[in-house]
Amino acid sequence: MGTQYASAVAVVRTMENSLFTQSDLERLINARDRKESETLINSKNAGTLPEVWEMLRTFAPDSKELEIILYRNDFHNLKAVLKAMVSGREPDSYIIQPSNIKNDTLKEAFRTKDMDVLPDYIRETATQAYELITTTLDGQLMDSLIDTACMKAMQESAEKSGNDFMRKYVNLITVCADIKTAYRCSKMNKNRDFLEISICGSPELDKESIIRATLGGTENLLSFLGNTIYAELSGLLKENPAEFEKRCDDMLIELAETSRLQAFGIEPLISYYIAKEAEIKNIRIISVCRECGADKVTITERLRKLYV
């Protein structure tokens, strides 16, 4: 374990004291109005994800592991730019930040048809997706191609990094994505060709096994998943898809918690970013639920696990 991030870890540990606690979330739920909510959020210095990202990059400017956690944003932005191009719209309002690739770089790649300006991990996918959407106009198929390519790119980069934490992080994201995709495909009776594009596969859930189970129908898929270490997710998906999504998010926090006692290495920095993602998601959940008139019990049930 490297010691080059020792000072960064010390700073991150101090910043963890500013993360929202369960008590803070309860106060936010009970806030009288939006002004009181905003006052509470501001008092915690709850920075945006781009701000957190910039801070972490100052500590570890050359970390490939940190880059991996933004791959999903990069590939999402690829979809946004392509769809905007086809529809004749500007993609800016659909772009997610932070990202490794500048918005202008993505747009320039398709304007000039020069994919060499893009990083290796997304270049081939950009070419394939462009050809697919311009020849078929099938947005759903393009989405599936890009989403699967994202998981594969994350797997390859995590493996290349040699970091066990990153392997587990990527594996968990891939498993949750594959299970959700397989379930939806089983409901829609998608064929093998579509599944081959839409399912990524991972060391714990083999691609071919998931595809065969999915082709057998929803009950067959759930039975297959029920005999894996992800049986819990299978049960939640059948009973309540929202609970499935919540459990996947909570499992990421549980993984992040494994780095809490580390004094060195990149893991605590990545875990802090995961914690901020969960925190911001919780704040958004509370805000949306309050606007919709949801009661306090319902809001609390939907909140994700906290890092602190």
Image (cartoon, rainbow, N blue to C red):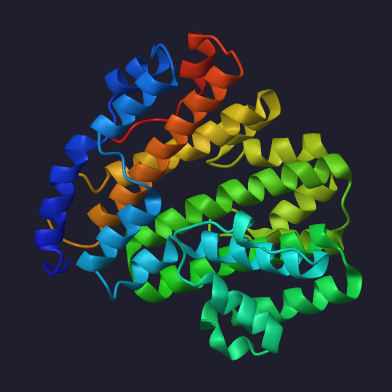
Quarter of the image for the N terminus: give it.
bottom left
Q: Residue furthest front?
A: 35
Of 253 and 90, nearer the camera is 90
Residue 5 visible in the snapshot = yes
Quarter of the image for the C terminus: give it.
top left
Instruction: Please count the marks in the image.
Output: 0
Which image quadrant is residue 56 in? bottom left
Which image quadrant is residue 235 in? top right
- Position of residue 42 in the picture relative to residue 180 (left or right): left
Q: x and y percent of residue 46 in the render?
A: 30, 39
Residue that appears at 81% across and 68% down: 86
- Relative to 241, say whether 63 is above or below: below
- Position of residue 94 in the picture relative to residue 55 (left or right): right
Residue 262 visible in the snapshot = no
Q: x and y percent of residue 180 in the render?
A: 67, 44
- Position of residue 39 in the picture relative to residue 171 (left or right): left
- Relative to 23, say whether 159 is above or below: below
Q: x and y percent of residue 40 in the render?
A: 30, 25
- Relative to 267, say whether 125 is above or below: below
Q: x and y percent of residue 199 in the render?
A: 70, 58
Residue that appears at 34% across and 31% down: 306
Of 295 and 140, nearer the camera is 295
Residue that appears at 39% across and 30% down: 305
- Relative to 27, say whether 1 is above or below: below
Which image quadrant is residue 126 in? bottom right
Residue that appears at 50% across and 72% down: 102
